[in-house]
Image (cartoon, rainbow, N blue to C red):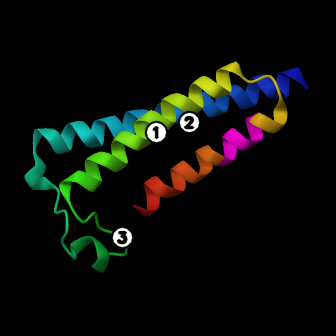
Amino acid sequence: MKTVIKILKTVIIVVDILLLLICASELYEFLKDSNSYHLGSEAMIENGGWSYSSNFTFIFFNSIMIILSILLSFLAFRSKKIKFLLLILLLVICQIGCLILL
């Protein structure tokens, strides 16, 4: 059981670090050249995606994703119970879904 917990911790931390890198790089690219992101336009909706209504919502969403990734990694590292790790894994899956859909 301890090996399952260690494997689950490792998977959660690795996935959260990848999400952290993706959101941080998106935020960095946006701050470097905000004209390349067509926020508030209908171009993304026509291609099957959603659109952010403003620059603030894009920055806010990516900032929340970065903070949540750090928090979930820390909680996974400190957790010793499988039920709590499964809850963290569910939150990581929801975080991936938000990143894909938004």
> Residue at 12% across / 38% down in the picture?
32
Q: Amino acid at mark 2?
A: Val
- Magenta residues span 85-90
Q: Residue furthest right?
A: 1
Is 46 situated left or right of 29 in this image? right
Mark before the other along the chain sequence, 2 or 3:
2
Dominant secondary-structure state across the stretch colored magenta? helix
Quick one: label 3, few (<14), some, or many (20+) residues within 10 Å? Answer: few
Q: Amino acid at mark 3?
A: Gly
| Rendered position, 34 above or below 18 | below
- Tell me if label 3 and label 1 are in contact, CB under 8 Å: no
Between the residue at mark 2 and the residue at mark 1, the CA separation in whole angstroms equals 6 Å
Q: Is residue 87 magenta?
A: yes
| Rendered position, 77 above or below 49 | above
- Residue at numbered disc 2: 15
- Residue at numbered disc 3: 49
> Residue at 41% across / 36% down in the picture?
66
Q: Secondary structure at mark 3?
A: loop
- Residue at numbered disc 1: 19
Quick one: label 2, few (<14), some, or many (20+) residues within 10 Å? Answer: some
Mark before the other along the chain sequence, 3 or 1:
1
Residue 74 x %, y %: 59, 23
> Residue at 43% across / 42% down in the picture?
65
**Picture quarter containing residue 81?**
top right
> Residue at 32% across / 35% down in the picture?
24
Residue 93 x %, y %: 61, 50
Report the quarter where the C terminus lies: bottom left
- Tell me if label 2 and label 1 are in contact, CB under 8 Å: yes
